[in-house]
Amino acid sequence: MNWTQALARLFALFGFILIVWTTSDQIFNLAVPAPASIHAKEITQSVKGPNTPALNIPSQPSEEDDLFANFSSRWPAEAIYLEGVRICIDPGHGGQAHRLNFKRGPTGFREAVANLRVSLFLRDLLQKAGARVTLTRDRDVDLSLAKRAQIANETSELFLSIHHNASSNPSRNYTSVWYHADLEHRPAAIDLGSHILTSLINHLGLSPTPLLSTGLLSDYLIYPGKGFGVLRHLRIPGVLSESSFHSNPEEEKRLANLQYNKREAWGLFLGLVSYVAEGRPKAKLLRADRKQAVFSIDDGLIARGGWGSKPVRLFHSLTRVESQRPDGTWIPTPFRIDLKTARLICLFSEDIHPRPNRLRITIVNMHKHHNFPRIFELDP
Ligand SMILES: [Zn+2]
């Protein structure tokens, strides 16, 4: 071989090494990294309280932890749809280590600690996907329920409060996700809750219980007519997860394991991914006069472009427009919908359908996701 051939082979070899090096780097990046920002020391400290037996929380996964390790081998391609989405994560409770037997498992492990750990892992996953995350708390402190909702309302477009459940029956252990009031209150929260519930069940593997027909439940079942304070004060779509029961001795042991907390965070993360991936429809008021109000309508998918993205994929048959009467009730209002131009036109007439102060628009996309916001104020 002459020297030009040798040089060509040398370049080919160098190129091959370069390809292997960059590819292997990408392969390793696919695995979900351990969140760098979770402070094992801080978490271990907050587990201990005057009434809590010291728990040995491993900061590094042991061999036994492999039981929980094989859950996140593939980063979901659809996580790109979380880019720029503003999400508020609320780790339930906190700052109550001094309270005797307050929200603790049978050996004293605190719910507030499990809530915080799962939330920190979830934050790191969401941030890796490009979401803009706000935590209501990032350490062992308490906040009022109204304050938590206020933080969410001021910063975010989606809300998730993370809790673990308790029962006087130690064998009880199931997954539930809670929405505020009834189905009509904020349908987008039902959509979100449904994705989160399915993903949590898939990842924690707790069997559905004959006690419940579904784990997606209204907070009115606990506090009739009032619901949970944190959800009641919310003005954006949000739900509260009770992923499992810390009062169950086996589950308490699992909740004390960081790898298991990570698995739960991964389940919540994939629930959020699949929710945003299926699109969040939006109606927007363009103009209103005495005779009509014109809205643009978006299925939450059209901006992605691609095959079949036009016209907007919204159910004509599930579209609803309602006017609010002075007594607060809602009555159906005539409308036209033009999917080609992505416009919805509400029609008023002085005698039968006078122009209201508030309109409620409901649009539903191909994945049965509902729009938010739904209520629009018209200038008087
Ligand atoms: Zn709780």
Image (cartoon, rainbow, N blue to C red):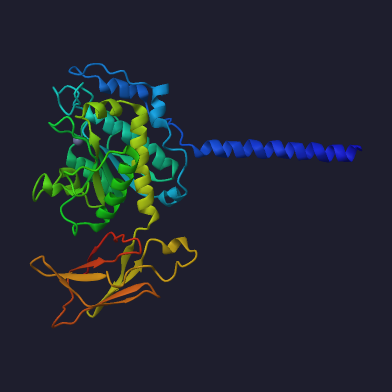
Q: Nearer the viewer, residue 23 or 342?
A: 23
Residue 60 seen in the current view: no
- Position in image of residue 32 (x %, y %): 46, 36
The quarter holding residue 244 reads: top left
Inspect this view and state whether residue 71 appears.
Answer: yes
**Residue drawn at point x = 18 percent, y = 34 percent:** 172
- Residue 156 versus residue 4: which sits nearer the camera? 4
From the viewer's side, name the closer residue of 82 and 28: 28
Quadrant hosting ligand 1: top left
Answer with the quarter of the image where residue 68 lies.
top left
Q: Where residue 8 sits in the image (x, y, percent)? A: 83, 41
Left or right of 361? Residue 102 is left
Q: Position of residue 54 (x, y in %)?
A: 26, 16
Residue at 19% across / 57% down in the picture? 183
Quadrant housing the N terminus: top right
Q: Residue furthest right?
A: 2
Residue 119: horizontal and vertical position, in percent? 32, 36
Is residue 278 positioned above or below 19 on the image?
below
> How many numbered marks are there?
0
Q: Residue furthest front?
A: 210
Q: Is residue 337 left or right of residue 29?
A: left
Image quarter in which the C terminus is found: bottom left
User: In percent of the image, x 19 and y 47: which residue is there?
Assistant: 231
> Residue 277 vs residue 139: left or right?
right
Q: Is residue 193 above or below residue 306?
A: above
Q: Quadrant of residue 164?
A: top left
Residue depicted at x 16% and y 48%: 232
Asked if residue 160 is positioned above or below residue 33 in the image, the reply reads: below
